Amino acid sequence: MRAQQSKFLASINSSADDELNISKFGQEVCPPDVGHDSEESAKVICSLCRDPNSKDPVCFLILLQKSRLLSFVDKGPPSWEQVRQSGKDPIFMSTDTMNVSFQRSTVSRSSEMISSSQLMHLIQNAVNEFASNGSPREVDAFLEFVKTRFPSVRNIQIPCTSNDTMEKTASSLEAMEERMYSLIRGEMHDTLSCSDFAKNNEKFSTAGGAPTSGDADSLFLGKYIAALSKEMLDNPSASESAHARGDKAQLESTVPLPAYDGFRPPDCDGIYVSSCGHAVHQGCLDRYLLSLKERFSRRIVFEGGHIVDPDQGEFLCPVCRGFANCVLPALPGDSKRGCKLPISTVGPSDAAGSLTSSNRIVGSLHLQQALSLLQCAADVAGRKEILKALPMQRNGRIRPHLEYVFRILHGMYFPGKDKIPGSGRLNCSLILWDTLKYSLISMEIAARSGRISLTPYNAIGTLYKELNSSSGFILSLWLKVVQSMRSKTSLSLILRLRSIQLFVESICFGVSQTCKARGNMLCILANTEVEVQYPDIQFWRRASGPVLAHDAFSSLMWILFCLPCPFLSCEETFISLVHIFYVVSITQAIITYFQKHQGNITEMGYHDCLITDIWRNMGEYRVAQMYFDSNYIDPSGDIKDIIRQLSLPYLRRCALLWKLINSSTSAPFSGGSHVSDISSHATLERMEFAVGILEELAEVEELEKMFEIPPLDIVLNDELLRSLVVKWLNHFSKEFEGGKLQRVLHSTPAVPFKLMLLPHLYQDLLQRYIKQHCSNCGVVLEEPALCLLCGKLCSPSWKTCCRESSCQTHAMACGAGTGVFLLIRKTTILLQRSARQAPWPSPYLDAFGEEDIEMNRGKPLYLNEERYASLNHMVASHGLDRSSKVTKDILLRF
């Protein structure tokens, strides 16, 4: 009687098997330690030519797609009882639109227009500043940039200075990073070896000024502008738009808070990278794509639309038929020649990758080490001998496959902004790192969902299993690519060094300096083209913003990006940075709790600790209560439990990041341990849910031991921590005084992604939605389609009046191209990916476990948890384009 249900579960297991095991086809096991790139690449066989003896480099097929998974989790699942019929889609898009309008209004309100004479005076001062420290060649390049970008400015004079005109021999950028690493470690050792720790604590907690001197900042930006001028020689078209500039410039265009996290695509939360795990030779892929384009153009008249558009770079994997739109080199040649692994000062038992809940003594947070690291890094980065030794190294030519990846990412991050890539101010490693950051966050969220149950599945083991998939492997490869590009150019290194100084000013001193306070150089950079928000300026604003205004894990990732490369794999550095941003996480959790809790602090029984400090500051600065929010907090719960629950996602992401950093996987599923059987996994999942999986707080305790975080009572009474948090609160309140808030930062526990909460009986859903009217024409919808992401009632039909409410249009606005709709009259699911649609089995079955399509038999239908959980997991893991069951049933709608 349950044959149809068994068939469905078998198809789910088969689909999952495709995702995990198909990568074994056409590939050989590659040992983790191989001497040469060519030898290691040869171990992976091209899926097209199948030549095992070929020495040509191979690339893995990847899919880059926009995602709003994080926003959906923060918002929480909609309820079926709340009908949305608005013809517009304010969800999520309103946040971005509001931020864009806020930036423009802030620019117009806080900017001061200056004439050509004033602009010339500003530029002359900048030239005078730079001429006293920069080399003659750099000063000439700086002047060339100014003349190109500000054609109205004439007769700039170069002052006669006694600056040594001898050019120092510039070392390679990789050698500079290693030297900086050694200098920072040496300075840290001197600082932390002082016997008077109380004096150091007072120094770190009470210092009120920023460490960056005006000369160092001027030299930083002067060399950056000079390097940009060199880039313009390679991209002459980038400067053509500058001649259209008028005689007036804006003195300041400071935006207190850019879009979410300061740097992201404008219409989604981020870009998610995934892979089916198959590899091809670049030449084989070019011939394959050429044949697809020829077939597409030759037969489109007869066949209509195809499920892929070769002109947009889309194609199907020749093995598994999964979607792809990019390739990534199997082994970047520069990854082994990049930064060397650091020589850790910890003992042999603490080598990289040894983070465990071992016998280490956990006394207090390593805030002293973290603050010392940050300040020493900022100090070394600002030394004149370091800045003067920076070589004027142009951008090396990006490899063709990486250039294609970068071009697609540019189109996603900066749609319609063709001026940005040619300007030289778009850093490749910056965008690649941001994509890695969001993919890690999405992977952690996907690991919370069970494949066959809607119950949260938060065991740490499942978190690590995500890295054993093909998508987990591609992130390891992606990290190697980013590492090989971080020190590729002087522009990239200067961007990172200046950013670490801005981060230190915000984290250690609680200050943000505006463009006017920064001096002439930044004003020149910010006003080259006022209408364009360049990514370097965006990132520097992100770095200088209040640390409490941003996600803690994102801040940790950006700090690791800016530090010299060897620090990435240093365990003691990683732990200390995890600690300081753990403080950010729990501070945000406490503020969010008080935003919901209306009781008195004295009734809670806390006296003279971090909780009371935050309570008193929130009484003075009400702006914090407007900024932090959560849809999952029970204000009647114990505040300590809530703090630990809200900090759990941060700790899980840190664990996933550290596992990724120390991953030695050289090919998808290299070694039998990377291949898991789905049927056995499902059995294990059932068993663990039956006996009860690790409770949320137990997982927090396990992660706290892993990262050497002391008990919460000790954390809340740490004096250095408390003084630091008060400084952060003052910084936050100062930046947002006067009602400058334009968004809300959500604090969310480790809850799984969930589609709409559907009723158990389908009749309840049918009665509510079957007679709903079109919001545009007022006619009863013939085919009502309920969006399971936001709850809006749409229509798959293409009537002129309903075009704005069509499934495809709504999917672009609501889910960044992803839509999941329940067809009310058919009881089945419609999956939408951009212009592609695919049917999915009904989540409602009768008492015998059978579907009743279009309700012809008229039997009561009940929600099947296993079916709905599998759909939830596929959406959470961005698997719509990777499931063979979906792709084989895809239809195209125009």
Image (tube, grey):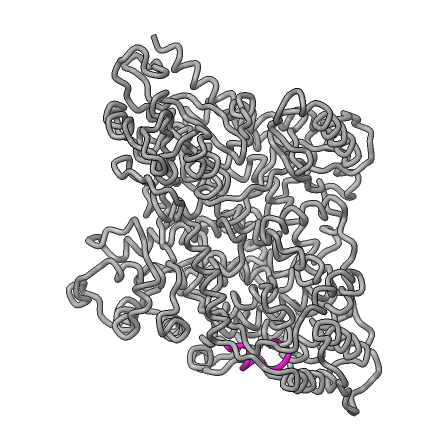
> Looking at the picture, how far across and down is residue 825, in whole percent?
34, 22
Residue drawn at point x = 70 percent, y = 62 percent = 423
Left/right of residue 234 with respect to residue 79 in the rendered view: right
Task: Say if the magenta span includes residue 784.
Answer: no
Q: Is residue 752 left or right of residue 515?
A: left
Determine the residue positioned at 68% across, 30% down: 29
Q: Residue furthest right?
A: 166
Q: Nearer the viewer, residue 572 or 378?
A: 378
Residue 605 in the image: state x and y as whole percent. 18, 65
Quarter occupied by residue 217? bottom right
**Relative to 108, residue 36 above or below:** above
Residue at coordinates 22% horizontally, 70% vertically from top-left? 607
Image coordinates for residue 54, horizontal then vertical, percent: 82, 31
Residue 262 x %, y %: 51, 61
Residue 816 is at least partly visible in this image: yes
Q: Is residue 455 visible?
A: no
Instruction: Provide the major secondary structure of the magenta segment.
Output: helix
Image quadrant containing the C terminus: top right
Q: Give the side of residue 169 with respect to residue 837, left or right.
A: right
Q: What's drawn in magenta, residue-wise?
A: 513-522
Q: Residue furthest top?
A: 1
Depth check: 564 or 768 in front? 768
Image height check: is 586 above or below 616? Answer: above
Q: Which image quadrant: the N terminus?
A: top left
Q: Tell me which corner region of the image, top left, top right, bottom left or bottom right, holds residue 161.
A: bottom right
> Is 836 on the left or on the right of 486, as rendered?
left
Labels in figure, total: 0
Query: Magenta stretch: residue 521 in it?
Result: yes
